[in-house]
Image (cartoon, grey):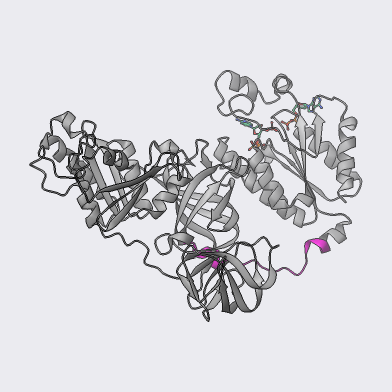
Amino acid sequence: MSTLSKAADHQPAQDNNFNFKHKSGAVDSETWSIFSTTGREFSITIATAPERNNREIHAALFKANVAIILIDAACGIQTQAKWYAYLASSFKIRHLILGVNKMDQVDFDPHIFHGIEQDFHDLCSHLDFASTAIIPTVSLQGNNVLNPSVHTPWYDGLSLIDYLTTIETARITDNRFIFLVQENNPANIRSDRCNGMIANGQITIGDVVRIAASGEIAQVKNIRTLNSDVFEARTNEVITLALDKEVKISCNDVISAAHSPLETTDQFTAVVIWTHAEPGLVSRNYQLILANQQADASITTIKYRLDINTGAHEACQQLKQNDITVCNLALNHPVAFDTYTTLPVLGNFVLVDQYSHATIATGLIMHNLRRAQNVHRQALSICREDRERLNGHKGKVIWLTGLSGSGKSTIANALEKELHSQGKRTYILDGDNMRHGLNKDLGFTNADRVENIRRVAEVAKLMMDAGLIVITAFISPFRAEREMARQLIGKENFVEVYISTPLEVCEQRDPKGLYKKARSGQLPNMTGINSPYEPPEHPSLVINGTNQNISAILRPLLQLVSSLQ
Ligand SMILES: Nc1ncnc2c1ncn2[C@@H]1O[C@H](COP(=O)(O)OS(=O)(=O)O)[C@@H](OP(=O)(O)O)[C@H]1O
Ligand SMILES: Nc1ncnc2c1ncn2[C@@H]1O[C@H](COP(=O)(O)OP(=O)(O)O)[C@@H](O)[C@H]1O
């Protein structure tokens, strides 16, 4: 977005008010610098190509007061510039400046500038800024950067630096006390002190505070910084709070003033900016980090994607790199939050890939979904243990995974027959069958397979809760969803069995003619041909699916099942 620091390097040295103090790469290599003018200090983060839009750039967007987008006068406002304008608007940066740079290369032509000005006004009509400005510049020579330029008599606005010094920069209006607990203690211990950082506002001895998760209330007896006891402490200070009584404190608790309690949510709508090359899929589990809190998160609905050329809201099935979208998300447990507009520190989050730990998206909470508050679990009188007692065995899930034609259905059938003859209560969930009923709206795109397995995992969990031994026979090609199923069902109830049959063998068997169709280009997204299969890394059992002796295949499987009882 901004290359102002480079422009500043080339300013003539005679201006005494301008002081270029420092340039370093501490935030995101070679992307920030600090300079000052009379009475004001600026720090600049330079965002380069969108694909470099990493977490640091988003941290800078989160703090920035002003966004400066520099474009080439000869090229006009291109998609990348529009994308940054939308990004700045989403992050609620209040002021936007468009620098129309390299004006010398278009002979300082006012018609070119005014054409771009019109496009800029059209763009800004879709966006939310308190002020916008457009300035013709030549950053290499400093025209309209530090001083007005003699080459642009038709421009009667301020130079970039003069304009920057006039901008009203106040951004955070909410001064509520927000304390992020950072403890190494095990979860939920009772204690009358806690360590952490003040993320917003201030605290004074005697204030009454509230722990968001438990709702417990206590009074602050003492505040200690690293070196000394203090009467009050402010934003960004790391302190220990001593309370007048013991309360339940977890390592990721959030504490507020008691008179302004924080809401918690496990379902909300957010702006989601997808930054990773791997697309974002509905129902896939990601890790959400919101301030000091973490939860498993999945996108439940993609409401729309912004078309940055027109401002239109488009339907979309998955999130692609640099998409700016609005989505509903669901978490596996509630977190303390606020909307990004009201309290940015508790309204912004990142999504992290559960395997690579790469940051894959940034989110800004728009609003809580009321259904999160209004849907409660219904307590039932008969529980899983009661049903298991009647059945004479525990409910479990035996999760078979493998290519189409690997032998999943054959093995699931043989296993069920054997368990049935032993008097066990069982049920098979099979890919082909589920797809005729509950999942008949789903196809074979990655997104549909993710949703397919999410539903299957939920059904398997309910059946296990009914006390059944559930055998699932789905390709379930992605590790992430098999892991999601394991987490949902509980690892003590779940075994993953890999039916390992080489693709060549499956292709030879081809009982439904699907491989033949895929090879001849008539079937898209066929697993193993033009859609990926990720074999399990640590399955409970690997079965050689080419072994023709079904009793030999069943032996270790039956042993595994009986070891679960
Ligand atoms: N494109 C494509 N790729 C893979 N499989 C296909 C496809 N189209 C139809 N079929 C048939 O659907 C069955 C697989 O469904 P699943 O629900 O197990 O698939 S997945 O887990 O969602 O990937 C699968 O059944 P099995 O052969 O028993 O595995 C196929 O019969
Ligand atoms: N162990 C095995 N040895 C030889 N053929 C097998 C074996 N298991 C399954 N088959 C055959 O392979 C084909 C695919 O088996 P199936 O159980 O339907 O696989 P999947 O459910 O994984 O698609 C069927 O024709 C089946 O008879």
Q: Percent position (x, y) of residue 272?
A: 45, 49
User: Image check: 395 left or right of 46?
Assistant: right
At x 60%, y 19%, the residue is: 519
Q: Residue 22 occupies which quadrant of the picture?
A: top left
Q: Residue 13 occupies which quadrant of the picture?
A: top left
- Taking the magenta stretch, the answer to whether it contains residue 378 is yes
Q: From the viewer's side, name the closer residue of 253 and 184.
A: 184
Q: From the viewer's side, name the closer residue of 228 and 510.
A: 228
Q: Percent position (x, y) of residue 100?
A: 22, 39
Residue 308 shows up from this direction? no
Q: How many labels, in total? A: 0
Indicate the quadrant of ligand 2 in the picture. top right
Q: Is residue 490 above or below residue 414?
A: below
Magenta range is: 368-386
Residue 140 shows up from this direction? yes
At x 39%, y 36%, the residue is: 49
- Taking the magenta stretch, the answer to whether it contains residue 234 is no
At x 37%, y 42%, the residue is: 46
Residue farthest to the left, as pictured: 153
Q: Percent position (x, y) of residue 533?
A: 65, 31
User: Image check: 3 left or right of 294?
Assistant: left
Residue farthest to the right, as pictured: 422
Q: Is residue 376 above or below residue 391?
A: below
Quadrant of image for the N terminus: top left
At x 38%, y 53%, the residue is: 91
User: Image check: 130 left or right of 561?
Assistant: left
Q: Is residue 556 above or below residue 126?
A: above
Q: From the viewer's side, name the closer residue of 10 and 211.
A: 10
Q: Percent position (x, y) of residue 125?
A: 24, 50
